[in-house]
Amino acid sequence: MSVDTAQPTKDDARTTRRKPRRRSTKDRLVIATMIAVPTALVVWLVWLPALASVGLSFTRWNGFRLENIEWVGTQNYRDITTIYPPFWPAIQHNLIWLVFLFVFPTVLGMLLAVVLDREMRGSRFYQTAFYLPVVLSLALVGFIWQLFYSTDQGLINEVFGTRIDWYGDPDINLWAVLVATAWRHTGYIMLIYLAGLKGVDGSLREAAAVDGANEVKTFFNIIFPVMRPINLIVLVIVVIESLRAFDLVWIVNKGRNGLELISALVSQNVIGEATRFGFGSALAVIMMVISSVFITVYLRIVFTQDQEEK
Amino acid sequence: MSTNTAPAPVEPETPPTNKHAGGTGVLNRKRGTIATVVMAVLAFVWLFPLLWAVYNSFRDYSYTQANGYLSFGGWTLGNYEEAWTRGQFSRTLLNSLYITVPAVLLTLFLSSLVAFVLARFSYRFNLTLLGVFLAANLLPPQALLIPVFRMFRDIPLPSFLSDTGTMLNSFTALVLVNTAFQMGFCAFVLSNYMKTIPHDIYESAELDGASVWRQYWQLTMPLVRPALAALATLQTTWIYNEFFWATVLISRGDKFPVTSALNNLRGQFFADTNLVAAGSVIVALPVIIVFFVLQKQFVSGLTLGSTKG
Amino acid sequence: MSGSRPTPSTTIPASFAATRGWTRRNMLIASGLGLGGAALLGGCGGGDSSGSGASAEPGAVRFGVNEARGSGPAFQRNEAMANAYAAAQGVEVTLNAVDHNTFQESINTYLQGTPDDVFTWFAGYRMSQFAENGLISDVSDLWPVDGMGEAFQQASTAPDGNQYFMPAGYYPWAVFYRKSVFEENGWTAPESADDFDALLQDMDGKGITPFAFAAKDAWAPMGTFDILNMRLNGYDFHMQLTKGEQAWDSPEVRQVFERWAQLLPYHQQNALGRTWQEAATSMANGDCGMYLLGTFVVDGVADVADDLDFFTFPALDDTIGNDALDAPIDGFCVAAGSDNQAAAKAFLQFLGTAEAADAANSEADAPMIAANSNASTEAYGALQKKSAEVVQQASSIAQFLDRDTNADLANTVITAALQDFIRTPDRIDEITTSIQQQAQSILGTS
């Protein structure tokens, strides 16, 4: 379409193509500002504090007077890995959290999306039902499930006549909390995939149907690959959610007794009357290091994808 | 050429849409029934916790204590009345509004600036820039608490922004912190979305002499409105639900947002589950309303540039 | 930060006030002379309550309360004191009521940020820690306080020898039970270790769990540790342990855990998921025979409050006896970050008076005993009267494990270790060794 209008100005087009390198001063200033302001904010409130935390992790400090900061080298890290009992369970729980989120809510959310993507009666209603928990805060989710899990007043024990302490028994409370998380997480994943499926060109599906591919095959061969950007987003979201998981266990029991997570351990050491800022920062740095592994992997995927397109 | 190809896609497109509705698009009867039943059961399971909370929020605590929760009766509105006053919801809901609305707007604005540059130009630092924002989104807030707190404590604010004179206990602080943390995700989603905008558009705009700012504000922003609407909904729920920063940066009872109000109901000496259920419903209502109002934009907007593939 | 700020306290030399005996009348005159504008507004309230503080001048104050508005008696008591002061002095007291949990969690950021002038706090290490770090103000010019004995002055004193605290009230930890349940079964409060064992056996035989028990709140089981340690190793050992002068993996501490492990079968199971309110309910409805807790237990079982009684934990070792107990003192501090020191001190001084205690007591039926001995005991319930007796008879009083111990150790190590022990009582060696290792790291001893 644009060919008609472009015809007489072809020479101009050639000159403008060079223009990006020679933008007006004003434009360059605008671009610089567009990047600088948000970057400044994120550097100031996220990256500088993160660096400061790395520095603090090699010290002992009670957080009151700056002159009380005492350099202790790697002692905090040594203590964490050797004599701090909740640390290894916390690492394990974070990993379980990550794997669980991938295996159950993510797969279920995807399946729900595939089914609800059909012209099904009441599809909108079902979507709403699954999505509703997503708008609730995790703290609220924790409380709502308390109505089910409470030993003495919970619905589950009342129905089955059991006396299981779902939030308190360290052998099962992690799973109880994960179920509550899944309740919220599934709808989230479902909605993102649902949106992704809507973006899949209907004719692709038809082409596959004509070829006689069954639905499972259609999904894995045609639809799933097309949804690559969505898969990426889901991956990032799941990793973010499982590494930062905090609110729910904090509400349940402050991340103790079977619910240790790294984020909760950091908080235990720096919130309230405990003032082990060096120690807490070291825990936080460990958390950041683990995060950065995932961040790197993720950025690499984005990068290779960009390369392929060029 | 173009006149020939233009109608061409129209022709095969009509039968598939019919087929989509009547053929593979709809499951055959037997499987359709199974799917419907499974969905209905699952949907009920999913709604049940919420319904259970709502149900018990209308019941008297002493009644449920005496008869167990598996009973019917003891209706009262008292839980809501008490929750409303004790949770000071008339104030905390307003506080949440003062925090959430500016934070969402600021997040969308700033992240759309970054996203535009990332999508529109291919500078060498693009990937690094995206990394800086996205990684910030992933960092644990607990890790940053101490330095952020110390900075905020020592930064004076004019009195119209903070009546305590520093960034502590000010809504400004919460707005900025939430914005800094949420920009990464938004910038990522928006830049993905903006990349689906055909590059030709920008080239012809440049031919017309449109400045970079006009390309951003008048060309790109209207085109990404669906994505902005979707992100606005997501961010509203996230920032509204945020409670970590609110707890540590605010220490005045009259400034807490609604997420901390729930704590007011869990008195140190008494745990009235039905009362907290009522409080939970009050806390949940605003975001549920936002969700229902914006549901349409939400679903369509969350396509998030997936057509790009 | 606050040190550089000129405070009104410099306007009146402490020596001057101390020698003159600073009465309300003097104060009025002083304020009339321009020594303090705020006092001019106040002071019209009657009464002969003397103000002996040098720098204390009534004025509008902000009062940080660690209970949410409407959360119950604890809030009402504070509100009543604030109202009484406002009425008497004609000044405004602005309440900043924050729910207990949030208040505790943000206390450090609160005090370093923009704290209220006066706030609710606790005696013990918890107070000393803030004093040492300059977060609370020296109020030694308000001491001695009329009606408060040596013990309270001691409890308000930081290691530097100055007072930083104003006690309001205290409550003992004891073994609570329902009188009617004990009567029905012919049980009586045990006098000796043998009585105690017999009582446990009998309850167990009748299908009643002897001890209600909750450990979801990590501080709750500390009460059991404290009392067993004081009974088996004595008060002095206990205090040395909390100060880090005794080792957590010593035979004495292990003995405490061993004895506790023997008693655990007589405690409610699944304690780790139970709040103390739920445990109190189990005692109230007769599932459990007794509950070792502070007297605030009555707030959890208000319906049967009249039927409650308690006894002090019996002696387990006759050479040590049973005259030591936990009786934590709650009270108030002046935040060093407040720029309103004079008014803050005046309010703090009021909070220590019998008048304030009476105001609190008449407003809310609370399980505390007023720290000020001049306070009226007329409004006291039976439990309060008995509490007062028990505490007066006790020869030694500890605060509480998490109030006597280094906060880092108590909050990040001991809490988790006690929960660990309750989960796996057979790992005593491992658990005590772990506490000691971490204690050395935290306290910097080796």
Image (tube, coloured by chain):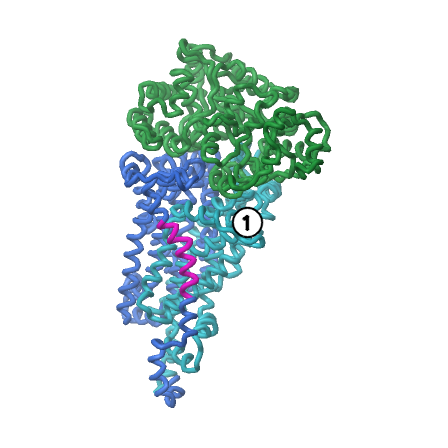
For the point 28% across and 61% down, which residue is it? A301
Q: Nearer the viewer, residue B138 or C165?
A: C165
Residue type highlighted by circle 1: Gly
User: For the image shown, how many numbered marks are present on the structure?
Assistant: 1
The shade of chain B is: cyan
**C433 above or below B32?**
above
| Quarter of the rendering containing residue C381 | top right
- Horizontal and vertical percent position of residue A277: 38, 40
Left or right of C75 in this view: B226 = left
- In the rendered structure, does residue C305 fall within the stretch colored magenta? no
Secondary structure of the residue carrying tag 1 is loop
| Subunit under mark 1 | B
| Residue A67: quadrant of the picture | top left
Res A164 visible? no
Q: Position of residue C273 (x, y in %)?
A: 42, 33
Give the residues drawn in magenta, as a range: A34-51
Q: Which residue is mark 1?
A: B165
Classify residue C72 as left or right of residue B114: right
Q: Nearer the viewer, residue A273 or C343?
A: C343
Chain C rendering hue: green
